[in-house]
């Protein structure tokens, strides 16, 4: 078995359809989705800036 790690830059409010298309295009099994969360800032608390930069998607490839 081999694993592949994909990095997806994402805006969680606007890119849900792109994420769905990407996940449906994978050939293997999705093992985990790990969000990269920024350090909390005043802007995030008041909803002025985004909290998640990108997602790491770990795929188990079938060989």
Image (cartoon, rainbow, N blue to C red):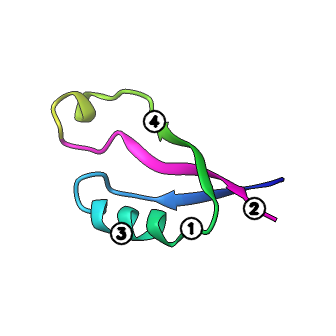
Up the image or down, 25 lies above or below 56; here it is below
Percent x, y of residue 62: 75, 61
Residue at 39% across / 62% down in the picture? 19
Would residue 47 appear left or right of 33 to someone viewing this image? Answer: left
Q: Which residue is mark 2?
A: 62
Residues 26 and 57: in front is: 26
Residue at 24% across / 35% down in the picture? 43
Would residue 3 appear left or right of 22 to someone viewing this image? Answer: right
Residues 40 and 60: in front is: 60
Residue 5 picture quarter = bottom right
| Cα–Cα gap, marks 3 and 2 | 24 Å
View extreme (front): residue? 63
Percent x, y of residue 24: 45, 67
Say if mark 3 contacts mark 2, CB within 8 Å. no
In front: label 4 or label 3: 3
Q: Which residue is mark 1?
A: 26
Q: Which residue is mark 4?
A: 37
Q: Residues within 10 Å of mark 2 (few under 14, many from 20)?
A: few
Would residue 59 appear left or right of 16 to someone viewing this image? Answer: right
The answer to whether residue 14 is magenta is: no
The answer to whether residue 56 is magenta is: yes
| Cα–Cα gap, marks 1 and 4 | 24 Å
Magenta stretch in the rendered image: 48-63
Q: Residues within 10 Å of mark 1 (few under 14, many from 20)?
A: few
The residue tagged with tag 2: helix, strand or loop? loop
- Going from N to C along the chain, the mark reached first, 3 or 2, is 3
- Going from N to C along the chain, the mark reached first, 2 or 4, is 4
Say if mark 1 contacts mark 2, CB within 8 Å. no
| Cα–Cα gap, marks 2 and 4 | 30 Å
In front: label 1 or label 4: 1
């Amino acid at each position: 078995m081999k694993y592949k790690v994909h990095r997806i830059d994402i805006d969680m409010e606007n890119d849900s359809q792109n994420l769905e298309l990407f996940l449906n295009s994978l050939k293997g099994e999705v093992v985990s989705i790990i969000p990269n969360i920024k350090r909390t800032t005043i802007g995030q608390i008041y909803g002025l800036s985004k909290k998640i930069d990108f997602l790491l998607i770990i795929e188990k490839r079938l060989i």
